[in-house]
Image: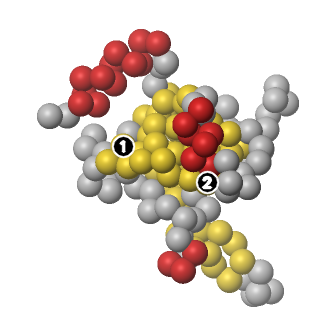
Amino acid sequence: MHLHGIAGPIVATINPTILVTIKQSAGYTTNPDFSRTPAYNIYTNVPAQIQALQFNDLKMIENLGITGVRRKIYLYTNIYQGMVRGLQRGGDLVIFPDNTEWLLVFIFEAYGDGLVSQNGWVSVCVTLQNPTSEG
């Protein structure tokens, strides 16, 4: 049973789904001066629901030293591999429609086949990287 197919439209009547861009870290390239430029796999028009963090979410991340403006996002894809330093994974960004960039800092839960598809979703914590003038 595909529960998101049932619950998603109901939740969207209260909290509309928006389309975001995901910049999934793909390592880096080394420049002639030996500086590094990040490389990304880019996924556009990914459905997402933005929410405030709930008490249980805050308890999960309270000892991680994450500061700044944070949100919880349900992304209707499951492309995140998480932050695994040994595998050089991490640094994924989510771009909201207002062009603010949010860094993925924690994965709460994930479900699905790991592809951009209707069969997966992931719940993540993100931290604002470039605030707009509105704050």
- Which residue in the protein does label 1 denote? 121
Image position, residue 89 (x, y; %): 53, 70
Residue 50 visible from this viewpoint: yes
Image height of 90 relative to 114, above or below: below
Marks 1 and 2, the one that precedes in the sequence: 2
Residue at 27 percent across and 40 percent down: it is: 118
Image height of 55 relative to 113, above or below: above
Q: Mark 1 and mark 2: span between their CA atoms?
A: 16 Å
Q: Secondary structure at mark 2?
A: strand
Q: Along the line of sight, which residue is nearer the eye, 59 or 14?
A: 59
Packing grade of label 1 (10 A; few <14, some 14-19, many >=20) is many
- Considering the image in quadrants, where does the N terminus appear? top left
- Considering the image in quadrants, where does the C terminus appear? top right
The answer to whether marks 1 and 2 mark residues whose Cβ atoms lie closer than 8 Å is no
Q: Residue furthest right?
A: 133
Amino acid type, callout 1:
Trp
Amino acid type, callout 2:
Val
Q: Is residue 35 left or right of residue 21?
A: right
Residue at 34 percent across and 15 percent down: it is: 10
Task: Residue 105: give its label.
Answer: 2
Image position, residue 111 (x, y; %): 32, 48
Residue at 46 percent across and 12 percent down: it is: 14
Image height of 102 relative to 31, above or below: above
Quarter holding residue 31 = bottom right
Q: Secondary structure at mark 1?
A: strand
Q: Is residue 104 left or right of residue 82?
A: right
- How many numbered discs, if any? 2
